[in-house]
Amino acid sequence: METVEERLERLEFYNLLTIESVDLTSYPFFRLVMEKKLTEQEVNDIIQLCDELEKLFFMQEEAGFVHYMPLLIHFAGMLTPKLKPKETILALLHQEKYISLMKKLYELSCRYE
């Protein structure tokens, strides 16, 4: 009979094969999630963070703000340490998630590298 550890090891191997064999170019954020072995809670936290920042971004944009560096700082500070901010921004942007926000955060991250 297969042990829990053996089963887990096999499932991790299958997951690795899936990542390598499936064309995930259309889903770079999902690929990043799998490669960095994020938990469901970590992904939910990122989604919630992006939802909140996007709302704030649109409110600030509507109010005429022109400096959005605090949004980038907040994003980077609240992101799981497993991910790099710029890599995550690009993955979300290429997966067409939070497009306006990610374009602005990417622009800022390039400016202040």
Image (cartoon, rainbow, N blue to C red):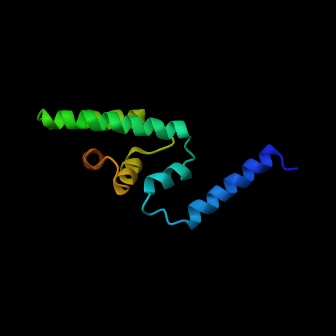
Residue 6 position, x and y percent, is 79, 50
Q: Quadrant of residue 95?
A: bottom left
Residue, far right:
1
Residue 91 position, x and y percent, is 40, 53
Residue 1 as seen in the image, left or right of residue 5: right
Residue 8 position, x and y percent, is 73, 48
Residue 26 position (above or below residue 104):
below
Residue 113 as seen in the image, left or right of residue 11: left
**32 or 47, nearer to the observer:** 47
Residue 71 as seen in the image, left or right of residue 17: left
**51 or 111, nearer to the observer:** 51
Which residue shows up at 63% across the image and 56% down it?
A: 15
Which residue shows up at 36% across the image and 39% down it?
A: 50
Which residue shows up at 60% across the image and 61% down it?
A: 18
Residue 65 shows in this picture? no
Q: Quadrant of residue 79?
A: top left
Residue 1 position, x and y percent, is 88, 50
